[in-house]
Image (spheres, rainbow, N blue to C red):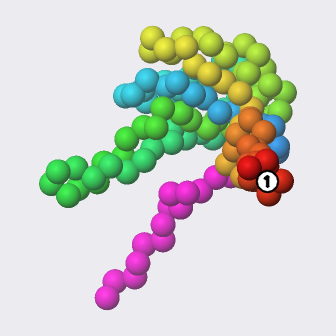
Amino acid sequence: PPPRRKMQGHPHYWPRAVDGSRVYVGNIRFGTSWQEVRDHMAQAGCVEFGKIIKTPTTLADGSKRYVSRGFAIVQYASVEQATAATETLDQLPLNGRNLYVRIDQGRSKRVSSPLPPIQMEHASADVAA
C-alpha cells in the first residue's frame, strides 16, 4: 500500500498560550466567517490563532455538518493586546450583533454556578407531635 500522508494538523490543535492572552468572543451571528471575526478582533492587536467553535449535527440523510455554536476563541500575541480587546471591542457590533468579549478562562476553570449550594434541611426527630 502507498505510504500514508502525514496529517497537516490535528483538528483539536491549540498552540500554547500565556495565561490571559486568549479571549472568548460570544454572540457571533450564524454564518459569520472566521476571517470576519479575525479582521474585527485584529483592531486590538496581532491575532495569532483563533477558532469559531462548532458542533457536529447529523442531517436526515445521515451525513454530518458542523454548525457554529455562536462563539470563538481568539489568541493574541500578548496579554496586553488581549486586555485591550476586552476593553475596546466588547459590545461592538459585527454583522448586526454586539459581541461579548472577555478573557478566556478555559473549560476547566469555569465556575459551575454563581449561586451557593442549596442546604437541605433534614426532618428533625424532636418535632412536636
Q: For the point 39% across and 28% down, which residue is it?
A: 30
Position of the N terminus, as image quadrant, is: bottom left
- Identify the residue at horizontal 41%, vertical 78% (top origin): 4
Q: Quadrant of residue 12?
A: bottom right
Q: Position of residue 108 (x, y in %)?
A: 72, 52
Residue 94 showing in the rendered view: yes
Location of residue 68 with respect to 40 vertically, above or below:
below
The magenta stretch spans residue 12: yes
Residue placed most toward the observer, 113 or 75: 113
Answer left or right for 96 relative to 108. left
Vertical arrangement, residue 25 with respect to residue 61, above or below: above
Residue ID for mark 1: 124
Q: Which residues are magenta?
A: 1-16
Q: Residues within 10 Å of mark 1 (few under 14, many from 20)?
A: few
Left or right, 104 with respect to 100, comes to right
Q: Is residue 110 visible?
A: no
